[in-house]
Amino acid sequence: MNDTARRFYAERDARTLQYGANATALARPIAVLVATDATSRPAQVAALALVNMLARVHRRIHLVVPTDDLRARALVDAPTLADAMVATVTSINPVLALTTARTPTSIPADAITIGIGTELPQQLDFYLGWHGGRGEIATAPCPASSTTEEEHLLGAATAACLAATMAFRAAHGNAVRPTRLNPLERTADADAGTTSRTGPVDVGNVLVVGAGAVSQALFYWLREIGVVGQWDVVDGDLAELHNTNRCLGMTADDAGWPNALPHGEPRHKAIITAELTGAQPHPHWYDTWPNLADGPRYDIVLPLANERDVRAQIAALGQPVLLHASTSSNWTAELHRHIPDRDDCPACRIPTAQTSSFLCGTGPANPTNPGSPDAALPFLSATAGLLLAASLLEIQKESQLITGRQNHWRLHLELGHRLWQSAIHLNNGCPHALPPAARQILHASAPGRWGSIDPAV
């Protein structure tokens, strides 16, 4: 490793190392083999998302990819899937030790081998598969379904998240665990069905507060699923290189490190995030945003920031429902719902500088800096963003997401025996939410698309 690479990794991988990673494991080669029969858009979505996540933590990648025309929406401009995968990983990690091949020969020794499609060698470490909204990793090739392609985008995205998780764990000596997961049903393994929904996401006008890792993951998936309506993204922060270990839409160049050297100007996170779907960026802190006082009332507000008391401020807006997603230091991706009077608010559930209100699980994470709220891994953020995207496809007044008592879902990505855990957090005198009478006045003066969800209406 030369001095440029050493400096790049020292700056980028600080958060990764907080999660108990070690440099030897990160240097173990990862080989991704895409079969010639894996040409569908879901297959390309899975392949591109997988290498996007891999390049943010792993330092040696080998790609075996056919030269099919690109059908998915790549992070960078490219004519073919092979070109897009190469350009994606090198834009994320300019010092990546990358090798490529047209056929599955000369795979690096000791590589963790991952297959997409069926026309592949039979002894790879694991394979990706999907059916409807269900994604999976298995120890044998998974045949693709013959139904409508768009129905499988959610499952393909899920499979990519599982595969990136398993690659990281396998690099650290963990055995492969065949896993099935449906983020829409919030089910796993034998219980995981194939329920799916197709885009676009259509929930009205949306305000997204925060443009960090979960927000970027949400927009990364929305770009593939499709989205309509006016979306505004507010965040005053600039990209830093350590953000690239978990932000699916961010490149080294965005963080001011072109060619792996800190000679560029970092870009605003709000702009990077909004560009993924054509949303409107607002590079301001939420509490000083000029539109805060006299801007429009949004149909949906997504509180995806965790600093500057943002959660409490948003809880006081009187929204009929708040949805957000988060990650934890215990290898979890989490989905949250907040309906006033019924549920607690975001600030009560996740107080500043405090972890989630679940009992802490035992996992392999080992953060060494408890003052860092954003230590994460790419597949954790990607999965959290996917859970939120799925919830936006699901949201209806009569849906289980809204009518059910559970309002907090935690997915354990250490991939142990139990993957899902749910909880009920009641409103026990929340000091942040508006009282019912005040919310009634708000809804009457500025009716929103989801106002009928509020118990006060």
Image (cartoon, helix red, strand yellow):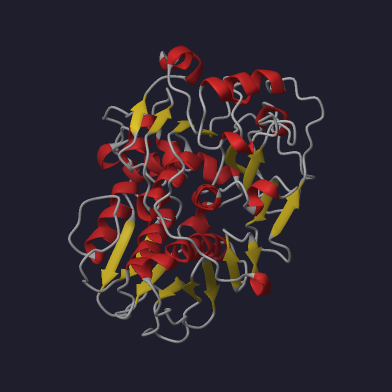
Residue positioned 48% across, 61% down in the render: 197
Residue positioned 72% across, 50% down in the render: 404
Residue positioned 47% across, 61% down in the render: 154
- Left or right of 234? Residue 394 is right
Height in image: 5 above or below 144? above
Whole-percent x, y for residue 244 in the image: 41, 42
- Left or right of 411? Residue 116 is left
Residue nearest the viewer, comparing 12 with 163:
163
Q: Residue furthest right?
A: 428
Whole-percent x, y for residue 26 in the image: 48, 56
Residue nearest the viewer, comparing 35 with 145:
145
Give the number of marks.
0
Q: Which quadrant of the view contains residue 433?
A: top right
Whole-percent x, y for residue 340 in the image: 69, 31
Q: Residue furthest left?
A: 79
Q: Which quadrant of the view contains residue 29?
A: bottom left
Query: Can residue 332 be spotted in the picture?
Result: no
Height in image: 224 above or below 231? below
Query: Can residue 96 be spotted in the picture?
Result: yes
Height in image: 316 above or below 412? above
Residue positioned 63% across, 25% down in the render: 315
What quarter of the picture does the C terminus occupy?
top right
Q: Which quadrant of the view contains residue 267?
A: top left
Whole-percent x, y for residue 85 in the image: 29, 60
